[in-house]
Image (cartoon, rainbow, N blue to C red):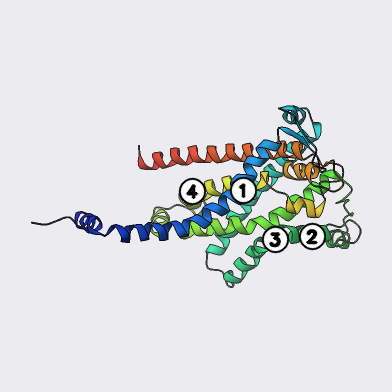
Amino acid sequence: MTVHPLRLRGARDARQPLRVRANTTLAASGFILPNLVMLGLFTLFPLVYAFVISFQNLDSLGWITWAGFGNYVTMVTDPVFWQSMANTGVFTLCTVPVGMALGLAIAVLLNGVLPGRTLFRSIIFLPLVVSGVATGVLGAWMFDQNNGFIDKMLQAIGLPAVDWQSNGAWALTSIILVTLWQRVGFDMLIYLAGLQGVDAGVQEAARVDGASGWQSFRYITLPLLGPSTFFLLIMNLIYSFQVFDTVWAMTRGGPGYSTTTIVSYAYRLAFDESGPSLLGYGAAVGVAIYLITLAITAVQWRLNIRREHAEQGV
């Protein structure tokens, strides 16, 4: 008679002394407890506290009065808030699809037989490991309209200099270009991983059947990169709605509010030394950012489940 291994294991676990099982549980709790404490202290508590003070009138001197939904009413009637939302939307539309297309093109190029491709991958990925503040400072130097590298290069080839810092549209353009330079390495890396998983036999069969290189890429490679594209789309959307460090280091949201994103507006309201120090109103804007990010995550979760069911034929 054959006894199932899991049944034997269960019998051995049942025979274990109570003291041994208690020690095992205690050791496991010892490993988990520090993580739970850190999560509660640095994530859950600030989140709950932000919700609480978003219903208060709280300034930097510590005066507190109950505001109810007053901060939220102020937010929906605040033109600067909606301008910040519009700036964030333009930033998202210009960085997410363009960055993903560039990342895919570079990944396809560096996935083939190319001399020095490891070096090129490292060079393209390098800006991603630099902090956002350092990238922003470098971008501010490059796009300085008086002594910047970009304007000097434009003038050297006979083109007029651009007012990168005093013109709102050009200032936002400079932030978008620096962000693309910084983020394209991440898109390239994810697409490279996806390309490594594409079955070479399927592409070879397509070539044998007479498919051109473009047809093989359009109808075989691109659909197989669907999970990578989906992941990048969600991650880049969340990043775009939370961008702060590069914007603040390059323009501090100016000139005026022309490059102020939703996060930099919340920071300017609550913490900027030259701002109004409205901590309650800043927390309300922060809650709005949280709800937007939560909505994007919920959409990702629903679409991911639907895609998995479609692949399994459920």
Residue 227 bears which disc, if any? Answer: 4
Q: Callout 3: few (<14), some (14-19), or many (20+) C-alpha neighbours within 10 Å?
A: few
Which residue is identified by label 3? Answer: 131
Q: Image quarter for residue 58?
A: top right
Q: Callout 4: few (<14), some (14-19), or many (20+) C-alpha neighbours within 10 Å?
A: some
Which residue is identified by label 2? Answer: 137
Q: Secondary structure at mark 4?
A: helix
Q: Is residue 124 above or below residue 57?
A: below
Q: Is residue 71 above or below residue 289?
A: above
Residue kind at label 1, given as amino acid type: Asn
Which residue is identified by label 1? Answer: 236
In the image: residue 304, left or right of residue 79: left
Location of the C terminus (image quadrant):
top left
Q: CA distance from mark 1 to mark 3?
A: 17 Å
Q: CA distance from mark 2 to mark 4?
A: 34 Å
Q: Callout 1: few (<14), some (14-19), or many (20+) C-alpha neighbours within 10 Å?
A: many
Residue kind at label 3, given as amino acid type: Ser
Question: CB atoms at circles 2 and 4 under 8 Å apart?
Answer: no
Q: How many marks?
A: 4
- Seen as rendered, the residue at the extreme right is 146
Looking at the image, tell me whether mark 1 or mark 4 is earlier in sequence order: 4
